[in-house]
């Protein structure tokens, strides 16, 4: 199985990412027209990692998203359930403590991390609400969550153009640069099916997070959500 369906069976999603691991970072840069770097910088600013803090980076893949946190002196744990992603990441960054884990059943104790973050991975989790509760469980009181995910452009004309790009332009581009273009058809479909900004904020609140807020990037193509665990 190299393409997951929208019911997001964990073994299907993991297998799909195993097949795209080697060229995943390059493909993302091409498909996002280079915007992925700016989005990751925004995530790093929102997480605001400090020396000696413990940061959990979920759906970390090859740990490209983890490196900015490590550079601050924080202790960052890249966690993913794709063994292929973890293997490629370990080959590139052997010093990072890569950990295999399912976001709905995290292999960590309660109240461990100062911050938990996930970029472009939450919509691939089978049970979003269970994942949000697990993130809350492993975060220490006073700690924070930062979620970076594709969302819904706020300007209607741009939203139409963006949707057309996802479903028409993205697959042929993916065929040119990806080892598994069918995976990117699934990713486009999963973006269209994802809740909008307000709906995700509401789900964060139901999972126990307080002071939930969001900020749109690139006109709402991507949104940063942040919340805190009550002290």
Image: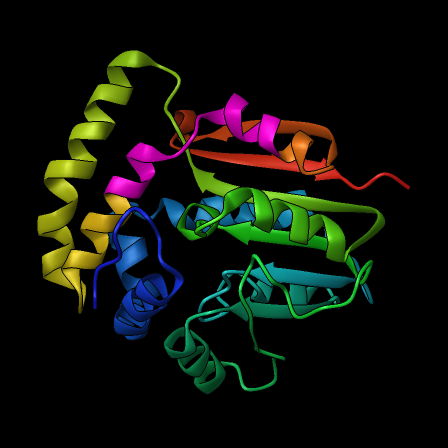
Q: Give the quadrant of residue 168.
A: top left
Q: Give the quadrant of residue 58.
A: bottom right
Q: Is residue 221 above or below residue 85?
A: above
Q: Farthest top residue?
A: 156
Q: Give the quadrant of residue 77.
A: bottom right
Q: Please tell me which residue lies in front, 208 or 117.
A: 208
User: What secondary structure characterizes most of the magenta part?
Assistant: helix
**Which color scheme is applied?**
rainbow
Q: Please tell me which residue lies in front, 87 or 65.
A: 87
Instruction: Count the numbered circles shown.
Output: 0
Q: Is residue 104 above or below residue 71?
A: above
Q: Residue at x 17, y 45 (%)?
A: 170
Is 193 on the left-hand or right-hand side of 219? left
* Magenta range: 189-203
Image coordinates of residue 64 in percent, x first then y, are 48, 65
Residue 201 is covered by the magenta coloring = yes
Is 69 on the left-hand or right-hand side of 18? right
Q: Farthest right residue?
A: 231
Image coordinates of residue 110 in percent, x first then y, are 80, 61
Q: Is residue 139 above or below residue 206?
A: below
| Quarter of the image with the C terminus in it | top right
Image coordinates of residue 31 in percent, x first then y, are 25, 49
Is 214 on the left-hand or right-hand side of 211? left
Image coordinates of residue 11 in percent, x first then y, are 36, 67
| Quarter of the image with the N terminus in it | bottom left
Q: Residue at x 49, y 83 (%)?
A: 90
Is 71 on the left-hand or right-hand side of 161? right
Q: Please tell me which residue lies in front, 173 or 114.
A: 114
Residue 147 is covered by the magenta coloring = no
Q: Residue at x 42, y 78 (%)?
A: 83
Q: Residue at x 22, y 58 (%)?
A: 183
């Amino acid at each position: 199985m190299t393409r997951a369906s929208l019911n997001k069976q964990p073994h299907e999603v993991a297998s799909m990412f195993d097949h795209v691991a080697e060229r995943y970072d390059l493909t993302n840069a091409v498909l996002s027209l280079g915007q992925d770097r700016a989005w990751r910088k925004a995530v790093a600013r929102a997480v605001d990692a400090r020396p000696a803090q413990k940061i959990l980076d979920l759906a970390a893949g090859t740990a490209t998203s983890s490196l900015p946190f490590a550079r601050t002196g924080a202790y960052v744990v890249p966690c993913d359930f794709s063994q292929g992603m973890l293997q490629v990441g370990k080959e590139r960054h052997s010093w990072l403590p890569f950990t295999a884990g399912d976001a709905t059943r995290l292999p960590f104790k309660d109240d461990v991390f100062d911050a938990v973050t996930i970029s472009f991975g939450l919509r691939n989790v089978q049970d979003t609400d269970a994942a949000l509760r697990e993130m809350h469980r492993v975060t220490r009181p006073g700690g924070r969550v930062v979620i970076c995910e594709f969302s819904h452009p706020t300007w209607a004309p741009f939203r139409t153009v963006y949707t057309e790009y996802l479903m028409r332009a993205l697959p042929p581009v993916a065929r040119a640069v990806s080892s598994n273009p069918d995976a990117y058809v699934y990713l486009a479909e999963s973006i269209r099916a994802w809740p909008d900004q307000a709906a995700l904020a509401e789900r964060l609140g139901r999972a126990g997070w307080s002071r939930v807020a969001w900020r749109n990037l690139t006109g709402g193509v991507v949104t940063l959500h942040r919340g805190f665990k009550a002290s």
